[in-house]
Amino acid sequence: MPDFSLNQAIPGVWQVRLPWVVAYILTNGKEWTLVDSGTRGDRIRLLQAVRALKLMPHDCHSVLLTHGHCDHSGNAAFFAARYK
């Protein structure tokens, strides 16, 4: 069982509850935006959540951060460098 949960807040907005933070995935069904990215240790969980929504990691359009703490920004550089 994954160590995260997915909850749809409203259509197109998903909450990804990770151990230290709640990230959000905003999607139109293909492209998606990540709001807050969890810690580096959350990377696998976050990618599992993306795939659980039947989205592709390379379709990440942008990463938005609410602030710079590591529990909110730990994967931002990873997504920016890997999924331009």
Image (cartoon, helix red, strand yellow):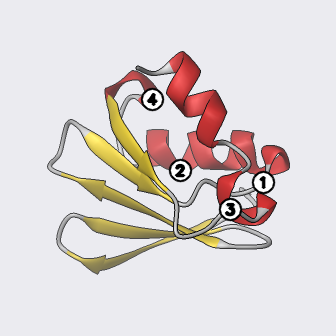
Residue ID for mark 1: 39
71 to the left or right of 29: right
The residue identified by callout 4 is 57
Q: Amino acid at mark 1?
A: Thr
Crowd around label 4: few <14 · some 14–19 · many ≥20 (10 Å): some
Three-letter residue code for mark 3? Gly
Q: What percent of the width, then of the height, locates residue 62?
A: 36, 41
The mark lying in front, picked from 1 and 4, is 1
Whole-angstrom CA distance, mark 1 to mark 4, is 17 Å
Residue on which the image places disc 2? 49
- Who comes first in sequence, dot 1 or dot 2? 1
Q: Which element carries disc 4, helix, strand or loop? A: helix
Labels 2, 4: front one: 4
**Badge 4 amino acid:** Pro
Circle 3 sits on which residue?
A: 68
Among numbered discs 2 and 4, the one appearing first in the sequence: 2
- Real-space CA distance between mark 3 and mark 1, rounded to the nearest whole angstrom: 11 Å
At horizontal 78% and vertical 73% (from top left) the residue drawn is 20
Q: Measured along the vertical axis of the image, is residue 38 above or below residue 10? A: above
Q: Earlier in the sequence, mark 3 or mark 2?
A: 2
Question: Of discs 1 and 2, which sits in the foreground?
Answer: 1
Q: Residue at x 23, y 37 (%)?
A: 31
- Which numbered disc, 3 or 4, marks the residue closer to the eye? 3
* Disc 2 from disc 4: Cα separation: 10 Å
Check disc 1 and report its element: helix, strand or loop: loop
